Image (cartoon, rainbow, N blue to C red):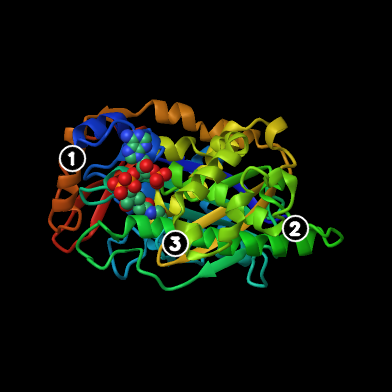
Amino acid sequence: PANVGIHALEFYHPAKFVDQTELEQFDGVSAGKYTIGLGQTQMAVCDDREDINSISLTVVQNLVEKHGLSYKDIGYLEVGTESIIDKSKSVKTVLMSLFEESGNHDVEGIDTKNACYGGTASVFNAVNWVESSSWDGRLALVVAADIASYAEGPARPTGGAGAIAILIGPNAPLVFDQGVRATHMNHIWDFYKPELASEYPIVDGHFSNICYIRSVDACYSLFTKKYSKRYRPNSEQLIKSGDLDYSVFHASTCKMVQKAFGRMAYNDMLQDPENEIYASVKVYAKFAYSEESYYDKGLERAMMQFTKDEYQKKVVPSLYAATNVGNMYTASVWASLSSLISSATDEEILNKRVGLFSYGSGSAATFFSLKVIASTEKFRETLQIRTCLANRTKVTPEHFTELMKLREETALLKDYSPISDISTLAKGTYYLTRIDEKFRRTYART
Ligand code: ACO
């Protein structure tokens, strides 16, 4: 099949949020630390009504309804998540409850886990299924979903929660470029979740940011080689970050994304240091890929300054969800793509190429790309990210802290009936009604 890619995207975010300026005051940190220092404006908040199953049920059912699909049309369904509430039973099997009425149980795929990377791995598996001899002509669906929460401390303002459903098939308007995925995986302890009874990770925050940038270097520089060989065989020059029309990133924070974009330009410069366009930053080329290059604040700031205008044009349109929802782990890079696609007009996006960088701690990362080859009007009509985010309910930092405590105390209990009010939930939201004495969970829909 030709032009395998994305036919539809659906985004779900929690109904409550906390304001990052208010959180700065509440936490007693200097004004601007979260909003300017991390680039975060608001953060999504979950109470005890939501878990990985409920947010995944919501996003899938909403996608199917909005696009008038039948569950019979789907032959592959995979879930990428690190919000693990069961060591055996997958979220995918819970989602099969939605297929029950259609009678379709012939659906391959299961859950995939590695930090924020599972959603991307699932997309690759789904694309591979459609392009393979196993394909039976039906569509593939991927869910990337997570509830990102941190213990009290410096990482807490980088939480969030969200779910994305991605419909994949041939002859799509957003087509993945073939043969250019550039991956880097290695064994590091930057962020991990060994405490199975807790939702919180162990995170070495500053180190994880360095690991992210090392992965940008490895993946992006390999991507430029693979892409240039495949799509520009007659050119001497490698593709540069400026040749991509948009760049979309895993957004642990929006500041991290700005640093990553600057680092792509740094990689470009190392390929061509004598080019006069780099005159203002050339002094940093001496660092090359040394250890110092990852810690030098002057280099980091200079590259952010150097790419400032391009960042506004090519990256900021993808950050609306990230800055107002926060980190969504596996969903993050796909929420960024959704933000871009839902805000750009056809004139701005048609025939344009988008680079994507996905990072999951531990670590697994890939740089890849897609091209928009048909109108994205249907995406704009159905996603409505700005409107949907504007309809949320704000909670105070005090209440946010209480809700985090409630989740800590109840998230993995048995024989528990959630207590949070459901009146703020948007129409069509699944919520947890009960965890019985055998840990079996049941859900209802608003
Ligand atoms: N006004 C403006 N900027 C400020 C202010 C202020 N008042 N105060 C601080 N800042 C800036 C700092 O200069 C710094 O900017 P820089 O990163 O460009 O140097 C930034 O705000 C953060 O301040 P720090 O003092 O570095 O913050 P702290 O050490 O308390 O926490 C940390 C930062 C450790 C990164 C924390 O946010 C964290 O743990 N985050 C989660 C880790 C993460 O997401 N890693 C990414 C990959 S893994 C994943 O996706 C889960």
> What kind of element bears circle 3?
helix
At numbered mark 2, what does the secondary structure look like: helix, strand or loop? loop
- Which residue is located at x 29 percent, y 64 percent? 193
Q: Quadrant of residue 279?
A: top right
The residue type indicated by label 2 comes to Leu
Quarter of the figure that contains the C terminus = top left
**Residue 240: % across, % down:** 70, 51
User: Image quadrant of residue 427?
Assistant: top left
In the rendered image, the vertical position of residue 298 relative to residue 220, given as above or below: above
Please name the amino acid that badge 3 sits on. Cys
Of residues 28 and 198, the one nearer the viewer is 28
Sequence-first tag of 1 and 2: 2
Mark 3 vs mark 1: in front: 3
Kindly tell me whether mark 1's CB lies below 8 Å from ligand 1: no
Q: Image check: 77 left or right of 20? A: right
Q: Check disc 2 and report the residue beneath it.
A: 238
Amino acid beneath label 1: Thr
Image position of 234 (left or right of 261): right
Give the residue number, with chain letter if any, for mark 3: 211
The residues bearing labels 2 and 3 have C-alpha atoms spaced at a distance of 25 Å
Q: Which residue is mark 1?
A: 401
| Numbered disc in front, either 1 or 2 | 2
